[in-house]
Image: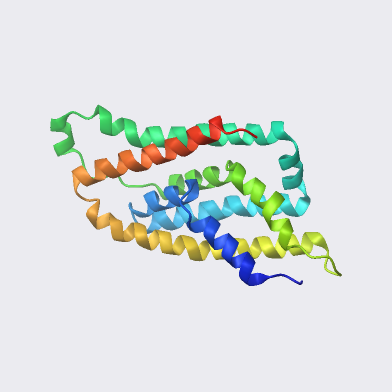
Amino acid sequence: MDVSWWAFVGVVMVAYLVPGPDFLVILRSATRGVRPGVAAALGAQAGLCLHVALAVAGLSVVLARHPDLLTTVRVLGGLYLLYLGGRLVLPTLRRAPEQQRRAPADPPASVRSSFVQALATNVLNPKAVLFFAAVLPQFVSAGDVPVWTQVAVLGAVDVLLGLVAWTVVVLLGLRLAALLRRERVRRAWDRTTGLALGGLGAGLLVAHD
């Protein structure tokens, strides 16, 4: 394989570390504990493995070339992010001041729910489809190695790089956890991350193909 690996690694790491839906979901989960954070990271990468499989099968290109299918993915992804954002914001608006003082800093996070949320967020992210349909093929070269093999290798490297990137995000979330034990800070964090996820979801819903 004649691949410009430095360029590929650079593009992939920028895509990971620029805050997006996966970044926010994993960071949020990590502030609630090591296990939820790790589960969210693995969930996101499990979703990415599905995108890799689709790319190897050539279905990512099919999805990208058929606007109706990509629009469906985009709308579902947008609605799901709005749902996640609403789940964070609404409880902070409904609590009475007296209830706020009595409420725990944050309910225990389910490892399973963290995994599923990150998995669904990644699978329903149309940018992941477009990455494998438009960006990754630029690093595929003509030669003796079959295209599907090159795509599989590049996809596997992408998944591994993602584990490195998400490790950094999980560590960041764990560092933030101590600060977020304060109720007022936690409520502000919930609103901020909820609005960010909702904003990303709304952006997907109003985006044009």
Toward the viewer: 76 or 209? 209
Residue depicted at x 43% and y 52%: 26
Toward the viewer: 122 or 10? 10
* Quarter of the figure that contains the C terminus: top right
Above or below residue 23? Residue 197 is above
Image coordinates for residue 85, horizontal then vertical, percent: 40, 36
**Left or right relative to 131: residue 110:** left
Q: Which residue lies furthest to the right in this view?
A: 144
Residue depicted at x 78% and y 49%: 58
Image coordinates for residue 46, horizontal then vertical, percent: 58, 53
Residue depicted at x 50% and y 66%: 164
Image coordinates for residue 40, horizontal then vertical, percent: 46, 52
| Quarter-of-image position of residue 184 | top left
Regarding residue 166, the answer to whether it shows in the image is yes
| Quarter-of-image position of residue 206 | top right
Residue depicted at x 61% and y 48%: 128
| Quarter-of-image position of residue 172 | bottom left
**Left or right relative to 193: residue 160:** right
**Left or right relative to 65: residue 83:** left
Above or below residue 85? Residue 33 is below
* Quarter of the figure that contains the N terminus: bottom right
